[in-house]
Amino acid sequence: MPRPNKYKSYKERGRRTAVRLYAMQQNERNTALYEAILRLNSLDECIRFFDDLCAVTELRTMEQRYAVAGCLLQGKVYSEIRRETGASSATVSRVNRMLNYGTGSVAESVREDLAAQGVTADTKE
């Protein structure tokens, strides 16, 4: 007779605990990092701060997503965006979803950057 898998219940209990902890963390967001970012005074200081804080791959991922957002807001098609940025179609899709259903903060920032460069962004909201 096979023995019951007692670890399954432990694993499930661990997953539920992790989900509960994640929910608590989202409700009690620590703002110290964001306050530190707001205190940065220059582009060079900001670059050095993020170089210390993030892995190179994390920085490149965020930079790529920001570039993808700019392309999407210019109305470029996925294949063109993938060619220009090197992003996967999954990343382009993820950024598109963020632009359509996110808070709007990144879209606003990208539009300001595009306007400063004299590039027109699509205004579909």
Image: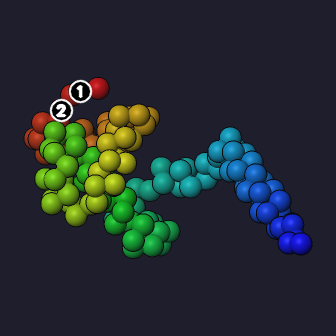
64 left or right, relative to 19? left
Q: Residue at x 79, y 63 (%)?
A: 8
- What amino acid type is highlighted by mark number 1? Lys
Residue 76 at x, y percent in the picture: 15, 44
For the C terminus, the image quarter is top left
Observer-nearest residue: 75 or 42?
75
Disc 1 secondary structure class: loop
Structure colour scheme: rainbow
Residue 59's place in the image compared with 73, above or below, is below
Which label is found at residue 84? Answer: none
Residues at discs 2 and 1 in contact (Cβ within 8 Å): yes
Please name the residue that numbered disc 1 is placed on.
124
Q: Secondary structure at mark 2?
A: loop
The image shows residue 57, relative to residue 38, as above or below, that is: below
Note whether residue 68 is visible.
yes
Q: Which residue: 27% across, 46% down? A: 69
Residue type, label 2 = Asp
